[in-house]
Image (cartoon, rainbow, N blue to C red):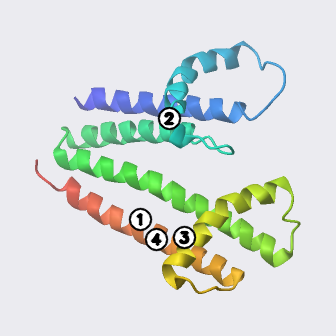
Amino acid sequence: MRFIMNLLGNLAGLYMLLIFIRVMLSWFNGPSLGRPVELLGQITDPYLNWWRRFPILRTSFIDLSPVAGLAALSMVQTLCGMAAKAGRITIGILLAIVLQAAWAVLSFGLGFFVIVLLLRLFAYLTSQNTYSTFWRIIDSIAQPVLYRITQIFFRRRIINYLAGILLSTGILAALWIGGRLLVRFLSNVLLQLPF
């Protein structure tokens, strides 16, 4: 069983690498990049297209379907690695993997919004031309987060924009750090379960 689980984990890791290369190559426009890239697309596109059918993973600016696909493969790789190490699959291992997968998605979202808010803070402090397309996209992502967090903490009071950015960034960063520590602790507890 250990050999099979190690093999499946390694195959999942290899497929993740192929998907990552495919996603990176898709960022380059222009003429065809040749037969190897076409072959890579034939191997990875069916899996990626399955994830693209979920509208929640796609917005007008961002396509998160490759991230979801990679997260699922990462979960499979983790399951196989833990099963190979333990020599069996237990409910505790499955629960720990589900917890870690859910945290991976949430952690990605928190990290993404922290980066967006830090970019917005940079633009605010350096008086960047926020009318360019890039800054309008950043604003369209940052504004709902800023609004929600300031509404939770300040209700109907109006606060300084800079204070809102700093507060929101700090809260999201604290949630990211605290969540990471909590998930690590809970995963270790779940892995100790005998069943």
Q: Secondary structure at mark 3?
A: helix
Tell me the residue that label 1 is attached to: 180
Tell me the residue that label 4 is attached to: 175
Task: State the separation of the CA atoms marked 4 and 3.
Answer: 15 Å
Q: Look at the numbered discs 4 and 2 and tell me whether their residues touch, using CB distance below 8 Å.
A: no
The mark closer to the camera, 4 or 2, is: 2
If you read the primary sequence from the N terminus, does the residue marked by circle 4 or circle 2 appear first? 2
- The disc labelled 2 sits on which kind of residue? Phe
The mark closer to the camera, 1 or 4, is: 4
Residue 120: x %, y % from top left: 73, 68
Q: Secondary structure at mark 1?
A: helix
Reply above or below: 109 against 4.
below
Task: Report whether 1 appears left or right of 69.
Answer: left
Task: Report whether 92 appears left or right of 143.
Answer: left
If you read the primary sequence from the N terminus, does the residue marked by circle 1 or circle 3 appear first? 3
- The disc labelled 1 sits on which kind of residue? Arg
Task: State the separation of the CA atoms marked 1 and 4.
Answer: 8 Å
Q: Which sits in the foreground, 11 or 43?
A: 43
Tell me the residue that label 3 is attached to: 148
